[in-house]
Image (cartoon, helix red, strand yellow):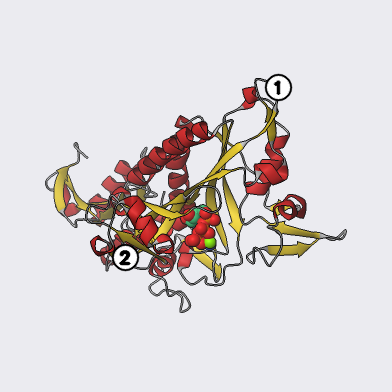
Amino acid sequence: MRFSKTFVKTLREAPKDETAKNGALLTRAGYIHKEMAGVYDFLPLGLKVIENIKTIIREELNKLGCEEILMSSLQNPEPWEKTGRFSDQEVDIWFKTELASGGVLGLAPTHEEPITELLKSYVSSYRDLPLYVYQFQTKFRNELRAKSGILRGREFLMKDLYSLHTSEEDLDRFYAEVEKAYERIFERLGIGDCTFETFASGGIFAKYSHEFQTFLPVGEDTVYYNADKSVVLNKEVLDEEVMADLGVKREDLQETTAAEVGNIFKLKFKYSEPLGLNYIDEENAQKTVYMGCYGIGVSRLMGVIAEKFADEKGLVWPETVAPFKYYLVGIGENGIRTAEEFYTGRETEIFFDDRNLRPGEKFADSELMGLPYRIVISDKTLTEDAAELTNRQTGETRLIKLTEL
Ligand code: ATP
Ligand code: MG
């Protein structure tokens, strides 16, 4: 991609109302555009980051045999009324809208009810189970606090996976597979060493749910962890009984802030029972389906990764999520010509700063935008048939022969 050919421009200053670091940097670097508090657009480079995150999640889920779908945002109140979740007393985060022909629709804040309803049309026998479906979908939530950039949106991207089973054992088996898949996902996203599976409140049926919490100064959650971080628990479940359960003592635990990037939940019959998602077992008896649900905050992850790795010069993307691996700059007549030649055929890997600007401005933008490596080809490096390669994260620079490059 050529810098000169995209409409995106970098900004020297962040918008005044953008107080979160992730929001400010991603806006300045041209990845996102703010519509209003908690509502953002993804620009070409930002969309690439989102797509890279989705690809990693998709690959890991497909390995488990999950099938991808895309459900609607507009929601018929009916199934939500059956579970009591359309009422503003129960759930106050709905965006609701009047239907021109009368009645009310909602914009989905999550999809347990509609997926349960949908699968009623396809599941009738034990032979149809287990099954696993997921989607990448825009959720709408009327969040009270939306001041954390893309960490908390009123409109945001979520991956939500739902699993259906004939037994608790099978739900447990799949839940454990998802735990491992999530670990691989966060590892591949570059946040494996700061993201921990965390005990959280489980609701009525299971004792705990599990969150995946990335330790982060601006994270909105408070978690407690032991020395080797083998036990991490959300503040909401910190009590004597839970600590005894997990074999830890209060004095062994340290407190920190974290951002919830995902969570997994054994729903059991929570939605299948009120909505009537049943199947016929081998003895011809009607049974209720066991369910699990598993979320990942896709747009929040982009913000978490931005926050986590940024330095005083700007963003620093892990290679796996970076929109391009290389930022290319040519300096001087020969440098620019050689850079052009080098770029040709490598357009998908290289972001080529071919603008007619001073090198200093290009270097500043390369640091702001945070691509993993910068390649500079100048008349000077060409005297050694080489280019200068700079690692954005370490700042380390070396000359590398063009033939090796
Ligand atoms: P939180 O406690 O942060 O509000 P939640 O418990 O409401 O999260 P879920 O409803 O389980 O979260 O959603 C699944 C995932 O979606 C969360 O783990 C989080 O990563 C992400 N998420 C939730 N709310 C938002 C939001 N308003 N903006 C961006 N991502 C969100
Ligand atoms: Mg929430």
Q: Earlier in the sequence, mark 2 or mark 1?
A: 2
Q: Quadrant of residue 343?
A: top left
Question: Which mark, residue 284?
Answer: 1
Q: Quadrant of residue 130?
A: top right
Q: Residues within 10 Å of mark 2 (few under 14, many from 20)?
A: some
Residue designated by label 2: 256
Name of the residue lying farthest toward the left: 384
Residue sitting at 87 percent across and 60 percent down? 102
Name of the residue lying farthest toward the bottom: 16
Name of the residue lying farthest toward the right: 101
Q: Amino acid at mark 1?
A: Asn
Q: Position of residue 46 (x, y in %)?
A: 46, 55
Note whether residue 261 is visible.
Answer: yes
The answer to whether 184 appears left or right of 391 in the picture is right
Q: Amino acid at mark 2?
A: Thr
Q: Position of residue 297 (x, y in %)?
A: 48, 53
